[in-house]
Image: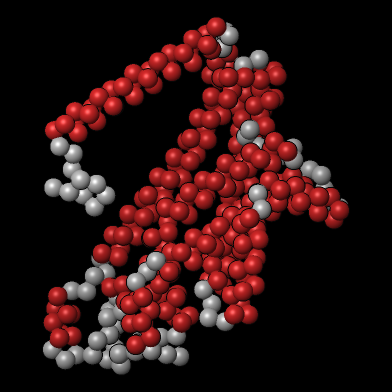
């Protein structure tokens, strides 16, 4: 039996794959042993360097939790602003009018080509010239850079998601008398969201992690900035890096888990709107075909779903 991506391995291939897997696991174990040995030689595995994260609540209340809140604040604001802005830019790139499509394309390609760190630096310099308070300037510069860059990337994700749908969807909508705006809002976008959800989630994870760039260069007091403060007071750089990395893993895992749950829910809701056999029988018997694209069914007999 063959898969779409590769042929089913035979007996020799299965044995070879097991040998490769065992060799990789042995190599991984050796690398882990070497890393732990190096850390032990530098006294980084001593208990007094790790116990403060359990026994000393000041590490969390003074450094980690405030930095985490700043990271979440910048990331959430960038997501809330960047997602709708990226969707609008993506729809603009799909416009039939050249005076809309071309300028939007230039904007998207421009901001997508500039590194997000440079956008943050330019935004910070602009806010300095504008007289923005120095206490909130790093936050504003971080959000501005994240929004400009990621909105451009999300625009391309939206455009690719809509273009990936079969052309028959839009053609059937035009046959029903729907305008392009109605087709996009009621037919294409609901289906494209499910297709582009993994790429969108990956970009949201990038937004969350890129907040560290503002902390490294602009002095934004986010989660990564707390590493320097904790290590300076407790002399435990490696344990602090490990704990902060673990916090990032938990945050990103929670975000991807929520996205997976949302994707499953959207797919189940679409399956629940499948046209029933008796509805198909009615259509074949000569009744007006009012079933909407993506499984929805019309109630009226005018067959157009409205063209106003």
Residue 279 screen position, x and y as percent:
18, 80
Q: In the rendered view, does 218 fall on the left or right side of 88?
A: right
Residue 307 screen position, x and y as percent:
42, 90
Q: Residue at x 36, y 82 (%)?
A: 171
Q: Where 56 sits versus 199, above or below?
A: above
In the picture, which quadrant includes the C terminus?
Answer: bottom left
> How many numbered marks are there?
0
Q: Where 58 sits versus 270, above or below?
A: above
Q: Residue at x 17, y 49 (%)?
A: 2
Location of residue 229 by image quarter: top right
The type of colouring in the image is secondary structure
Residue 64 screen position, x and y as percent:
61, 30
Q: Residue at x 70, y 36 (%)?
A: 216
Location of residue 23 by image quarter: top left
Residue 57 seen in the figure: no
Residue 19 vs residue 132, the one in the foreground: 19
- The residue furthest front is 12
Residue 215 seen in the figure: yes
Q: In the rendered view, does 105 fall on the left or right side of 12?
A: right
Residue 220 screen position, x and y as percent:
71, 39
Q: In the rendered view, does 303 fall on the left or right side of 242?
A: left
Residue 128 vs residue 37, the one in the foreground: 37
Location of residue 82 by image quarter: bottom right
Q: Where 249 sits versus 278, above or below?
A: above
Q: Residue at x 50, y 30 (%)?
A: 246
């Amino acid at each position: 039996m063959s898969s779409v991506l590769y042929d089913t391995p035979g007996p020799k291939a299965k044995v070879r794959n097991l040998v490769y897997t065992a060799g990789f696991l042995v190599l991984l174990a050796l690398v882990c042993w070497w890393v732990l040995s190096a850390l032990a030689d530098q006294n980084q595995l001593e208990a007094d360097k790790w116990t403060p994260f359990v026994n000393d609540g000041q590490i969390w209340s003074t450094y980690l939790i405030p930095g985490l809140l700043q990271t979440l604040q910048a990331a959430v604001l960038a997501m809330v602003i960047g997602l709708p802005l990226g969707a609008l830019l993506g729809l603009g790139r799909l416009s039939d009018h050249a005076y809309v499509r071309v300028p939007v394309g230039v904007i998207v390609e421009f901001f997508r080509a500039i590194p997000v760190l440079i956008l943050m630096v330019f935004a910070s310099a602009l806010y300095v010239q504008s007289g923005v308070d120095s206490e909130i300037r790093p936050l504003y510069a971080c959000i501005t850079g994240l929004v400009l860059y990621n909105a451009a990337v999300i625009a391309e994700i939206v455009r690719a998601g809509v273009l990936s749908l079969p052309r028959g969807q839009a053609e059937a909508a035009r046959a029903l008398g729907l305008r392009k705006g109605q087709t996009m809002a009621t037919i294409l976008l609901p289906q494209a969201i499910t297709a582009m959800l993994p790429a969108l989630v990956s970009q949201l994870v990038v937004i969350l992690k890129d907040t560290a760039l503002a902390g490294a260069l602009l002095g934004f007091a986010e989660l990564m900035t707390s590493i320097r403060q904790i290590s300076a007071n407790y002399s435990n750089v490696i344990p602090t890096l490990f704990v902060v990395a673990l916090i990032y893993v938990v945050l990103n895992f929670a975000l991807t888990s929520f996205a997976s749950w949302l994707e499953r829910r959207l797919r189940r809701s679409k399956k629940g709107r499948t046209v029933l056999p008796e509805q198909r029988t009615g259509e074949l018997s000569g009744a007006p075909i009012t079933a909407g694209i993506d499984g929805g069914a019309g109630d009226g007999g005018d067959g157009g779903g409205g063209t106003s």
